[in-house]
Amino acid sequence: MIDIDGLHLRAGSFELADVCLHVGPGEYFVLMGHTGSGKSLTIKAVCGLVRPAAGSIIIDGADVTELDPRDRQVGYMPQDCGLFPHMTVLKNITFSVRVRGLGGREAVEPLVELLGLGPLLDRRPKNLSGGERQKVALARALAGRPKVLLLDEPVSALDEPTRREVCAELLGIQRRLGISTIHVCHSLEEARSLADRAGVMHDGQLVQTGTVADLAANPATAAVARLMNVPFEKK
């Protein structure tokens, strides 16, 4: 469903080098790595916010490498949620569908019900809790019925109980919709609770992919071992 092949991208002095990744239909893939490893830059390239110098990005069999973000059928949720503070919850959720002429509240009513957002529709973001803001941002990302979902550290700003709750809801919604998802984080516990498979980025390279259990049992590099909190024995 998502195929990244030979992705090269430079941002200032930082470089993504030859990133290759396949995410299957309906797969929940967690992209891990320490701050500055290139995780967020990778998914920004997938959704079209930055353009690669080389390589290709294929979504559902279509090459989207040169397409504008709005033409990629991608739902993107930034780390800060990116909600418009002057808009109500309803207007935030329906923003993309209204801009594209795809309807208003009726177009997002199933999402509103699925996420339990009905009582919040007239509020503004400043009057929401952290968990409520995450749900609104998720609803907005899904409103345009994207083929893939990209989540950039969606729960990093939440306290631990809320983080666990939102992660459970994220996985439940992803399973119900069957949407291929890349979720960026640096939390091992978060990855364990969500991932079908995971990948570890280090210094702009995707150094290993596999199940979280496989990564912990057989870390390919010392960087993977540190992230998985296991010893590393060089082979």
Image: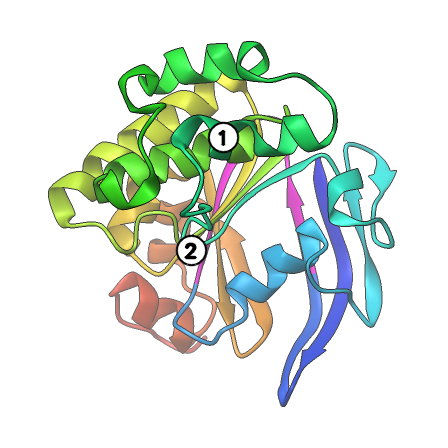
Name the amino acid type tagged 1.
Lys
Q: Position of residue 182 (x, y in %)?
A: 53, 44
Q: Where is residue 59 in the image (x, y as percent from the top left)?
A: 76, 38
Instruction: Reply yes or no: does residue 25 show up in magenta.
Output: yes
Q: Determine which quarter of the picture holds residue 172.
A: top left
Q: Name the residue under label 1.
A: 91
**Image-based side of 12 in relation to 177, left or right:** right
Q: Mark 2 points at which residue?
A: 79
Please name whichever residue, 195 or 77, is drawn nearer the observer in this view of the structure: 77
Few, some or many residues within 10 Å of mark 2 (<14, 14–19, 20+): some
The stretch in magenta equals 20-32
**Image-based side of 109 in relation to 99, left or right:** left
* Quarter of the rendering occupied by the C terminus: bottom left
Q: Which residue is drawn at 86% across and 37% down?
A: 62
Please name whichever residue, 55 or 177, is drawn nearer the observer in this view of the structure: 177
**Image-based side of 65 in relation to 48, left or right:** right
Between the residue at mark 2 and the residue at mark 1, the CA separation in whole angstroms equals: 20 Å
Give yes or no for contact between labels 2 and 1 (Cβ–Cβ under 8 Å): no
Res. 172 visible in picture: yes
Q: Determine which quarter of the picture holds residue 125.
A: top left
Q: In this view, does 162 lie above or below 122?
A: below
Name the amino acid type tagged 2.
Gln
Instruction: Reply yes or no: does residue 160 show up in magenta.
Output: no
* Quarter of the rendering occupied by the N terminus: top right
Q: Is mark 1 on a helix, strand or loop?
A: helix
Q: Position of residue 63 (x, y in %)?
A: 87, 44
Q: Which residue is drawn at 29% across and 57% down?
A: 187
Q: What element carries label 2?
A: loop
